[in-house]
Image (cartoon, rainbow, N blue to C red):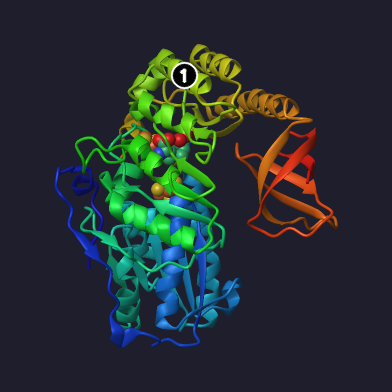
Amino acid sequence: MHLPNYQEARKRVAKDYQRVAFSFDRHIQGKYKGKKFYLKTYGCQMNEHDSENIEALLVYLGFIKTADYHQADLVLLNTCSIRENAHNKAFGMLGRVKHLKGQRPDLLVGICGCMAQEASVVDKILADYPWVNFVLGTHNLYQLPNILDKAIEEEKQQIEVFSKEGDLVEGIPVIRANSFKAYVNIIYGCNKFCTYCIVPYTRGSERSRRKEDILKEVDELIQDGYKEITLLGQNVNAYGKDLYEDYTLGNLLEDIAKKDIPRIRFMTSHPWDFTDHMIEVIGKYSNIMPSVHLPVQSGSSKILRLMGRRYTREDYLKLFHQIKKVVPNVCISTDIIVGFPGETEEDFLETLSLVEECKFDNAFTFIFSKREGTPACKLDDFVPLAEKEERLQRLNQVVNSYFLQNNLALVDQVVPVLVEGLSEKKENMYFGYSDTNKLINFTCNHKIMVGDIVLVRITSAKTWSLDGEEVE
Ligand code: SAH
Ligand code: SF4
Ligand code: F3S
C-alpha cells in the first residue's frame, strides 16, 4: 500500500527524469474478456486525456465500454480536486455505486485522478468506503492493469498512490475520443503553487516531454488524418525549462506549425512565462489558432499577490494588449476567482474594471473554494458566502455582455469552422468551432463530413454561440 502525503508532494527536485517506454504484462492480456467498464471523468482536459489512456488499458485487459453504470462490472471514477463541488460530485456518484454494490457484491469500484492524491480523501476511503476495490494516483496511472488484476486476484483493497512523480512514461496506449481532434501532453505537473490551488500537489512537478517524442506523436496523428491538436499542460508556457537550455513553447509551436496540420491549439498559459517570441510565433503561423486562454484570476494587484500569481494587474494588461497587437484577430479567454480571502468590494471592482478593459471572448468564473493543505486555506476569510455569490452574479453579467458584444461583431464575417457534427435540431444543420474557438451552428446544403474545415458566413449572434451558413 502507498498512501499520499503532501509534505512529500511539495518537494521539488531538479532531476533528469528517466524516460521509460510503457510495456504491457502479456499474461493479463484479454484476461477479463467480455467484462464491461463504466468510466466517469471529472475535471480538466488533462483528465479527459488520461481517460483516453485508461480506456485503452482496460480494453487490453479485455473489457468493453458501457455508458450505463448499472450494466458495468467495473465502475472507475477519474476524479478532480480543483473545487469542493468536484469532490461532492465524485462522492455523490460513489453513494449511487454503493447502492449497486449492495445488490451486486462482485461489482468492482476504482478511484483514480487528482482526488486519489489527497491524503484526506484516501483516509476517508480507508475509514468509510472499505468496499472500494482500488485507489490509483495520477503518477502511476499506467499501472492500472496490474493493480486492477491484483485487486481481483487478492480480493483485497489496493491503495497505490505515489506522492512524488517517478519516471515519465512514454507510449501509454490510447483510444482517442475523437477521430479528428486530439490532445497531446507536452508538460506534466505544475511548479507555480498559486496559493489557492491543489494541482501542484496532485500532479507533481513540471516535467516536459522530449520534443522528439511530441513531434513523433504529432506526425502519427497527421498520418491518421487528425485535423486539430491541442497541446496540453497545466502551464504549457513552462514547456522545456526543465529539459533544455533554449527550447521553449515558442520553438515547439514553430516546429509543429511547419508540419501539415491545419489547427494547433495549446492550453493553459500562465501569464508569467509568456514570452515575446511565443507571441510572435502565434501571430506568424496561420495554423496556430488565434485563441489564447490566459487566466487572470483577479484584477486587483493586492489579491494577485496573495494568490501568489507573480504578476500585477498592470503586467497582465500589458501582456494582454501585446498579444492583441501582434496576433491578428486573436480571441482571449480567461479564468476568474471571486471571494478570495481578503477580497474587498474595491478589489472586486478592480476585477470588473479589468474585464471592462479586456472584453474577454470567454471566461470561466468561480467562487474561491478552500482546498485542504494549500496556503490560502489558512487565510482569514471574512467575506460571507452570500456576498461572494452576489459578486459572481455581477461578474457573470458583465462577462456575458462582452461575449455577446464580441459575437455580434462577427455577424456578416466569414470564418473557418471545423465540423464536429450534425445538429440534432434541424436537417442540414451542423455545428463546429471557429479558429477562435467559438461554437458555430450552421446550415449547409451539400454533403460535408465531420472533420472537414468549411467557411461559414455568420448570420446572427448569441451569447454562447453563433449561427451561420456555409459559403461554397
Ligand atoms: N493551470 C491553469 C489552471 C488550472 S485550474 C492556470 O493556472 O491557468 C482552472 C481554474 O480553476 C483556475 O484558473 C482557477 O481560476 C480555478 N481554480 C483553481 N483553484 C481554485 C480554487 N481553490 N477555488 C476556486 N477556483 C479555483
Ligand atoms: Fe494551479 Fe497556479 Fe499551477 Fe494553474 S499555475 S495549475 S492555478 S498552481
Ligand atoms: Fe481537476 Fe486535477 Fe485537472 S484537480 S482540474 S483534474 S489537474
The 10 Å Cα crowd at callout 1, few under 14, some 14 to 19, many 20 or more, is: some
Query: Viewed as shown, does residue 123 lie left or right of 46?
Result: left
- Can you tell me whether the CB of the residue at mark 1 lies under 8 Å from the nearest atom of ligand 1? no
- Residue 140, x across and y down, in percent: 29, 63
Disc 1 target residue: 322
Name the residue rendered at 71%, 30% in the picture.
407
How far across and how far down the image is residue 151, in percent?
A: 33, 78
Give the residue displayed 35% in from the left and 48% down from the top.
186
Instruction: Determine the image quadrant of residue 390.
Output: top right
Q: Quadrant of residue 248?
A: top left
For image coordinates 54% across by 34% down, the residue present is 290
Quarter of image, res 462 = top right
The N terminus, quarter of image: bottom left
Q: Is residue 271 above or below residue 149?
A: above
SS for tag 1?
Answer: helix
Q: In the image, is residue 462 above or below residue 418?
A: above
Residue 307 seen: no
Q: Give the residue type that dot 1 points to.
A: Gln
Q: Indicate left or right for 80 with 211 as reference.
A: right
When the figure is inspected, residue 36 is found, relative to residue 308, above or below; the finding is below
Which residue shows up at 47% across the image and 31% down it? 284
Query: Residue 428 in the image: x percent, y percent?
Result: 83, 56
Residue 62, image x, y percentages: 44, 83
- Name the foreground residue: 364 vs 333: 333
Count of marks overlaid on the render: 1
Kindly tell me whether residue 46 is visible in this rendering.
Answer: yes
In the depicted structure, whether residue 441 falls above or below residue 420: above
Asked whether, in this view, residue 394 is left or right of residue 232, the answer is right
Front-lying residue, 386 or 472: 472
